[in-house]
Amino acid sequence: MDLATLTALKPAEYSEAADGYRVAAKMASAARDDIENRITVAMRTDLKGDAATEASKQVTRLGQNFHYIQTQCGLIGTALEAFSYELEAAKRKLDTALAHAGTAGLTVNPDGSVTYPAGGEKSEDGKTPPGGTVTGLTDATASAVGRQAAGFDPNPHHRLAQDCADLIASALKDATEADEKWAPKLRALKADDDLTVSAEDWADTSSDTAGVRAVGGEYLNSLPQPPKDGTPEQNAEWWKKLSAEEQAAWVSARPGLMGGLDGLPASVRDEANRIVFDTTRGTMQMEFNSIQPPGNKWTWIVAGGYPTKVYTDEWIEWNSKHGDRYEQLDRSLDGMKAIQHRFDTTGTNGLPEAYLLGFSAENDGRAIVANGNPDTADHTAVYVPGTGSDLKGVGGNIARMVDVWRKATDETDGGSVSTITWLGYDAPDTVEKDAPFEHYAYDGAPAFRNFMDGLDASRAGDAPSHTTVIAHSYGTTLVGAAAETGRLDADDVILAGSPGVKVSRADELDVPKGHVWNAEADGDVVPDIGRWGHGGDGFIIPSDPGFGANQMTVDSEGHSGYWDKNRQILENQALIVVGKGDEVSLIPPPKPWTHVK
């Protein structure tokens, strides 16, 4: 970039353009919300038939397209803001150099060199030290040598001129580097010329986001930084103090970080995690499509006179290279399909908007999905699933909390309800090999406590929500570990099929006395099997009378039926969620034994 261009440049114009893209992103977000939470809801409610179903699918895709527009415009806005920031820094350098040159009577030439006049004390022969022209130096060593040489010159203007020339050269260098760095990134933020937002488009968005984040570090580092290892309360205060521009920059450039910060508003975490969700899904789908297995998996050979079915050489070679990754991608994509299904069923039979409060596809995956906004709900329930829970099977756990939401909403007498599936920890994979170990519970406990604290920190009003923790199987062990090692921050705790909660009494679970509820179904073998690893003193578990929990009536069977529809146990959970524990059906306590003569 030359001197004339930088002199005439107005970095604020790029910031103004960024404002325009942020406005466009907000408009796209509003359009998406309107489509997902009003238009498609009305279509599912009022229209029936194959044509209506197909029309609803098309409108849903339109909403997803608006989300793509929102994401891309937000990213462009952040890129332009970062470019403006870097140009503004270069322009300030140039303006400072020109001001100093003008004050000192120096002449700045079109090529950036600086001419200085004769000046200083006359020599013995009566001559004034002559003037000259210097060129700016940006190399640190060369610049130091140049300043040293200028310092030895009896003409004091020489040193001033060299300083100004160096500052001008530095400004031009910075502006040129910013232009060369950002021009290709901004050109890359261009969508395909079609009406379909494909997996390729979202994979490209993932690449674009990484690119903007990589070159935009200077701008991002200039913003107020999130608290290092901050508490949910500190995170909430940090977020509230950011300007709208700063908030938008953090969400667009660091969606994974913002989506995982406990204490931020649910709407913000949802926006950030939806970006992570869609870009991850697109990237994984592209990779999955590229490593499909060969069609000829099996062949027949004759061994010992008998035909035998064996794998083909092509399939064996493919499996050795891609088999494990293919299976992992397949499992992750199944889970993401289930989460998308929950998004797409908003409005069905009154189902509220879903909020994606956490998401990761790494390893077994993580997902935190809320039915309804917990920031404004009168009653909130957080469900912790147990052994075998992973991203692939998250759909079943989400469905359980949908059913609890429906029952609780029926019982709430007009209050609002939010039910949350919290798969925010690495659950044991198998009952036999992994579930006997306690480290899964203690490793996940801090994340659960932070999430619970975050629900309080992000509340939209002063009134707290009545909060219930619902845990199943090994999830109860995690909840117990969380209470044992810190504050649980809940009003009620419901335990179902618990193998033990690491503590020995209900009053150690950090909820008011009488607000621990337990369910053990006929045929559920997990409680007795697990007590030896996760029970409290004397291996006591919540099903034991001595633990002190309210023992609920359970009309389901086995280990996984506690959320079966039209069951009393589901109704019991709903009553507890909305604060009607006095209406819960309980098993009568055993009568004290008396000796008969």
Image: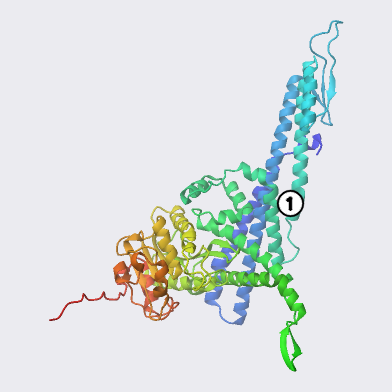
Q: Along the line of sight, which residue is nearer the eye, 71 or 154?
A: 154
Q: Residue lying farthest bottom?
A: 305
Q: Which colour scheme is used?
A: rainbow
Q: Name the residue under label 1.
A: 186
Residue 31 relative to residue 234: left or right: right
Task: Relative to 79, say whether 493 is above or below.
Answer: below
Q: Along the line of sight, which residue is nearer the eye, 132 or 302?
A: 302
Q: Can residue 198 be seen in this view?
A: no
Q: What residue type is labelled 1?
A: Leu
Q: Residue 62, image x and y in percent? A: 64, 67
Look at the image and tell me in which quarter the C terminus lies. Answer: bottom left
Task: Relative to 318, say whether 223 is above or below.
Answer: above
Q: Residue 83, image x and y in percent? A: 70, 44
Q: Quadrant of residue 10?
A: top right
Task: Relative to 39, say whether 557 is above or below.
Answer: below
Q: Along the line of sight, which residue is nearer the eye, 479 or 443?
A: 443
Q: Quadrant of residue 559?
A: bottom left
Q: Is residue 437 visible?
A: yes
Residue visible at 84% across and 23% down? 133
Task: Relative to 545, say whether 482 is above or below.
Answer: above
Q: Residue 303, image x and y in percent? A: 74, 90
Q: Residue 407, image x and y in percent? A: 41, 73
Look at the image and tell me in which quarter the N terminus lies. Answer: top right
Q: How many labels does the image show?
A: 1
Residue visible at 54% across and 66% down? 37
Residue 535 relative to residue 357: left or right: left
